[in-house]
Amino acid sequence: MVDSILFPAKNELEPLSHRVGGLVKACYSFPAEDEAAARKMSIQIATGQTIGFLPDDLPIYELHVGRVVNIEMLGDRGRATIVFPAQLFGNDISGMLTVLFGKISFAPGLRLESVEADSNFLRLLKGPRHGLSGIRTIVGKQHSKKPLLMAILKPGLGPSDDKIAEQFGKLVQAGTDLVKDDETRIDLTLDQALVRLEKVLSSGKGKGIYVTHLSGPAFELKQRALKLQSAGAQAFLFCPYTYGLSILQALCSDPEIKVPLFAHPAFTGIMSHGSSAVSPSVLLGTLMRWSGCDAVLFPSPYGSISLPKSEAIQVHESLVRPEGQLKVVASVPSAGIMPEFVSRIREDFGGDVVVNAGTGMARTGSGVEEGAQAFQREIDIHFS
C-alpha cells in the first residue's frame, strides 16, 4: 500500500490532480551511492516536505503526501521527480517554495533543478499582467519583432537628479525604449523618488519609458507604488528576493497597480550557487513568471558576473515557453552587454528579449547617445 501511494502509475496522476487541485512537479538532484540510496532520499523529500515523515497509516494522508514519479542515477548523483498536491499551498508561491525546498534545503548537495505544473494548477495563477507583448504596446512597438532596447542610469549613485534626468533625456532621444534605475538606488523617502521621477519625465519630453526602482519599507511599498504611478511612473523595478515572493505576488496581482513590474536578480546568486541550491531557471524563471512579473533581468553569459550559457538559456526558456494561459515574460539577459554581443544574443536567445546595457551603453563612443545608437544599429542589422 505504501509503494502504491508513494510511487504512483502514470495513469493515476490525472485523477489525482483533479482531487487535489492540481500537481506541481519538482525535480531534485543529490549525492547518492546507488539507486537504493536515491530511493531513500526521494521518499524523505516526498514525505518530509509534506506530512513530515512516513507514518504507518499512510493511506489516511494520501491526498497530502508527495509522490515520486521518477528516480534515476547520473554518476554519483541521484535524480528524483516528485509531484506535490496543490491543495497544500494553493496559489501562494511563497508557500509552494516552502513545501518544495524548505527544511530539506539544508541537506548537503541537494539541488532543486526544475519546477513545472499541470493545467489544473496553472489555472490558479494570474501570471504577468502585461508580459512582453504588453510592454511592447506601452512602448509603441507592438508590431515590431525586434528586441526592445533598455539602458541603465549609470552611475546610479552620486549624480544629482538633474544629471540623471539629463542622461535619461539623451538616451531616449537617441532611440532607447526603456531606461531603468540601478537597483542600488534606494529611496529613503517617497519624496526622493517623486522629485527624481518628475525631472526624468520632463527631460524625456514624452519619449521612452522610465523604469523606477520601487524601494522602501515593505509596509510602504503599495502606497509608494500608487503615488509614483499617479505621478506618472510608467514601470517599476523591484528586487523580489530581498523583499520576498509574497510581497512580489501581492504587487503584481494588485488591481490598483497597473504598470509593468521588472524583477531584478539581486540576492539570487547566494541561493543558486552552493552545496544546496535552487537552479536559476526556477528562481529567475518559473517563480517570477508564476508570481506575475512582466519582465525579468538575469545575468547573461557574457559579463564578469555571469551565468553559464546553458543556465542562462534555461532561464530564458522558462520565461517564454508556452505555459497554460500565462503570458510570455520579457526576458532581459543583463550584465556585460556590449553592442558587439547583440548577434550572440540573437543566436542564444532569439528575438523575445530586451537588450539591456549599463556600462556598455555609457562607455561606447563618446557618450550615452552614441552608445544607444550603436546598440540600435546592431539590433537593426541582426534582427531585420
Image (cartoon, rainbow, N blue to C red):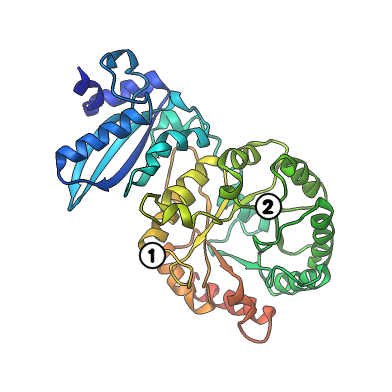
Q: Tell which of 114 and 229 is nearer to you.
A: 114
In percent of the image, x 32 and y 47: which residue is there? Answer: 108
In the rendered structure, which disc, 1 or 2, sits on the residue that comes first in sequence? 2
Q: Which mark is residue 308?
A: 1
In percent of the image, x 16 and y 46: which residue is there? Answer: 33
In percent of the image, x 48 and y 28: which residue is there? Answer: 89
SS category of the residue bearing label 2: strand
What whole-number distance in Å separates the C-alpha atoms at marks 1 and 2?
Answer: 28 Å
Mark 1 or mark 2: which is in front? 1
The image shows residue 28 at horizontal and vertical percentages of 31, 43
Answer left or right for 46 relative to 259.
left
Q: Is residue 84 above or below residue 282?
A: above
The image shows residue 197 at horizontal and vertical percentages of 80, 59
- Residue type at numbered disc 1: Pro
The image shows residue 356 at horizontal and vertical percentages of 57, 66
Label 1 Cα neighbours within 10 Å, binned few <14 / some 14-19 / many ≥20: few
Q: Is residue 310 above or below residue 94?
A: below
**Residue where numbered disc 2 is placed:** 236
Answer left or right for 214 relative to 128.
right
Q: Tell which of 247 and 17 is nearer to you.
A: 247
Q: Tell which of 83 and 103 is nearer to you.
A: 103
